Image (spheres, rainbow, N blue to C red):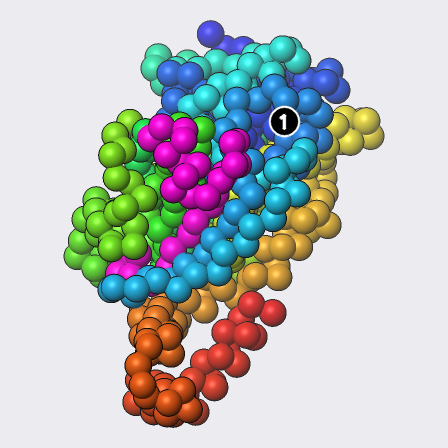
Amino acid sequence: MDEEFEVLIIGAGPAGISAAIPLARAGFEVMVVERGEYPGSKNVFGGILFTHQLEKLLPDALENAPLERSVTRRRFAALSAENEIAMDVKVTPWRDKPYNHTMTALRGRFDRWYAEQAEAEGVNVIPGMMVSELLVENGRVVGVKIQPGDEEFRAKVVISGEGAHAFLARQAGLMAKELPKRHMITNVKEVIGLPKEKIEDRFLLEANEGVAMEYFGEAVKGYFGMGFIYSNEESISIGIGLTVHDLIKSKQTLNDMLEHFKNHKTIRKLLEGGEILEYSAHMIPEYGYNHLPQMTMPGLLLVGDTAGLINGSVYHEGTNLAMGSGILAAETLIEAKEHGLDIGSAEALAPYRQKLEDSFILKDMFKFRKIPDFFNKFPHYLRDYPGHIASWMEEYFTVSETPKADIEKGILKKIKRDIGLWRFAVDMYKVGRAVR
Ligand SMILES: Cc1cc2nc3c(=O)[nH]c(=O)nc-3n(C[C@H](O)[C@H](O)[C@H](O)COP(=O)(O)OP(=O)(O)OC[C@H]3O[C@@H](n4cnc5c(N)ncnc54)[C@H](O)[C@@H]3O)c2cc1C
């Protein structure tokens, strides 16, 4: 077969499908090629699905999509070897629609449903086919080669929503060939089945409410990364992730790290009696704004994780940036066609980056642009502070006849011994600047 499509999209993830729907609505002929047996079959996330972009495309999605629980409780904790200190935010109005646009989901179910919505709009979604190569002629991407079968599909524009590894985008020269080890977070996750009532009792939730819990410090043995627990309807998702660089340095496997997290004294009770239903692994491209790749070349546009669109910070957003970038990629092509341009030309694709800059996607990534480099450059924040702070807190709340004033003096002495007052002040100043 040697067919030509108007737009060919690689990957039926949130980014690819969010590009496909508006394009089909605008009358474009769109094909999505997905390597999985069905959309979502190979996809992994934590996961909270941030739904504001989804609702833009499908206003009834909150009623119709296979979503799990609305997240009303967000918890950020630092673990030391024995202890935990946490910030716990519970907002009861998030129980009600639009649920703070924050729903837990399982990708196998959600992605399949989302691709079906695109098919209903006229998008041709072809699962079980992998794009193995981009076809490039005179500096322009003109199509793709497919496996199995070495067939070639030609297209006026290819949108790559292939996800974190971005093999094809690397092949096209839009980013370095080597994965950046300090900016790729490698993750492993289990879905653990638990009865609905147990989940609600253990995590202090009303029916259908969910929790998102993120853990730093000892969760990943003090490396750059975190552990997480998200509650689904009748299961919890638990996992850990850390940079490839730190995983190599640790000389551990991802599975060792996950077991370490699951067996932490403050975690293991949450999992008791659960049955492992799924095990998966995947990368997150946490390049940060300062290391984003080139996002277009003639005939090619990158969306979602392929383009490194992740807001790591404390928000841990990826799905909404993926969907938002898909929508903006579609908008770029629709406007180009309206202006009578060749939709794959450099001129037609040029506005895409500016659209990203003007949206929440790059505004938020710009705000947190220093974070990935900061924690790579100063590993002691994640390595040392969780343990120190937990031990200071333990001392502060330990009940004895020691006068409280003496306890406070004792803690000050500990800060001097553990870190030094001047260094402590400098560290707090530096971290404040990094997140500003
Ligand atoms: C462990 C983990 C936890 C996460 N937690 C969260 C979270 O809680 N909230 C959040 O918002 N984000 C989270 N993320 C990030 C989020 O998953 C991504 O940002 C999002 O999935 C990006 O969507 P995408 O469509 O760009 O890529 P993907 O979802 O990766 O989709 C890529 C698609 O392309 C297909 N594909 C790949 N290569 C080819 C090829 N050559 N040919 C054909 N098809 C191909 C894949 O099978 C897949 O369907 C997490 C990620 C991980 C790994």
**Figure quadrant of the C terminus:** bottom right
Quick check: 365 above or below 170? below
**Residue beneath the point at 68% across and 22% down:** 60
Of the pair 44 and 83, the residue shown nearer to us: 83
Of the pair 370 and 386, the residue shown nearer to us: 386
**Residue beneath the point at 70% across and 47% down:** 359
**Residue beneath the point at 29% across and 40% down:** 271
Q: Quick check: 220 left or right of 47?
A: left
> Where residue 304 sits: x, y (%)?
54, 39
> Where residue 367 sits: x, y (%)?
62, 61
Q: Quick check: 431 left or right of 91?
A: left
> Where residue 32 sits: x, y (%)?
53, 19
Q: Is residue 219 in the magenta section?
A: yes
Residue 80, by quadrant, is bottom left
**Residue beneath the point at 43% across and 61% down:** 86
**Numbered range of the magenta stretch:** 194-223
Of the pair 66 and 381, the residue shown nearer to us: 66
Residue at numbered disc 1: 62
